[in-house]
Amino acid sequence: MKRWIILLVFLFAALCGCAGPSEKSTSDLIRESPAAKLLLPDGSETFVDSEIASLRSFADLQIKATPLEPADREEDWLYRIVFNPSEKKIGAEEIVVSFHEDYVQIGQEFYLPEEGVSCESILEWAEGKFAYFMN
């Protein structure tokens, strides 16, 4: 009986050890991003490497996914951040974050501010980052 218990413990440990790492969330990937590219609708752009921690704070903004069908077009964004830009991190998955008047778009997903958070505060965050890095 003792051998069976030991065998079961080893089997359980082996199974747990064989499980692959869990897939990282978009927020995790943003927090780990070594660089970002900032873009404005007029075509202006700049890269951020050494001070990327300031932009990584985007992952802490209080937004939630929504099945939103926006009234504006995808190209009607005000600010755009590309985390893991291909120009700086070859082979990494780019994460495109677009700030619109009333929502945030990450890739093809749409996000709204959580309750108690205004869209204006999220746009102010983006405006402040862009003003700092693009001037």
Image (spheres, helix red, strand yellow):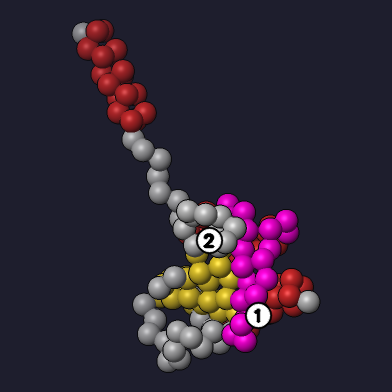
The three-letter code of the residue at mark 1 reads: Ser
- Residue at 36%, 28% in the rendered image: 17
For marks 1 and 2 on the same chain, the one whose residue lies earlier in the sequence: 1
116 lies above or below 93: below
Q: Quadrant of residue 35?
A: bottom right
The answer to whether any part of residue 121 appears in the image is no
Please state the horizontal and vertical placement of residue 16, each as a whole percent of the image.
Answer: 34, 30
- Residue range corresponding to the magenta coloring: 30-51
Please state the horizontal and vertical placement of residue 102, each as a whole percent of the image.
Answer: 53, 85
The answer to whether any part of residue 28 appears in the image is yes
Residue 44: assigned label: 1
- Residue at 57%, 61% in the rendered image: 87
Quarter in which the C terminus is drawn: bottom right
Q: Check if residue 39 falls in the magenta segment.
A: yes
Left or right: residue 51 versus residue 36 is right
83 lies above or below 119: above
Q: Quadrant of residue 50?
A: bottom right
How many badges with numbers are in the image? 2
In front of the other: 75 or 68:
75
The three-letter code of the residue at mark 2 reads: Ser
Left or right: residue 33 versus residue 94 is right
State the separation of the CA atoms marked 1 and 2.
17 Å
- Residue at 56%, 67% in the rendered image: 82
* Pointer 2 residue: 86
Please state the horizontal and vertical placement of residue 47, each as a whole percent of the image.
Answer: 67, 66
Q: Secondary structure at mark 2?
A: loop
Q: Secondary structure at mark 1?
A: loop
Please state the horizontal and vertical placement of residue 61, each as a whole percent of the image.
Answer: 59, 67
Residue 2: assigned label: none
Quarter in which the N terminus is drawn: top left
36 lies above or below 128: above
- Residue at 52%, 54% in the rendered image: 90
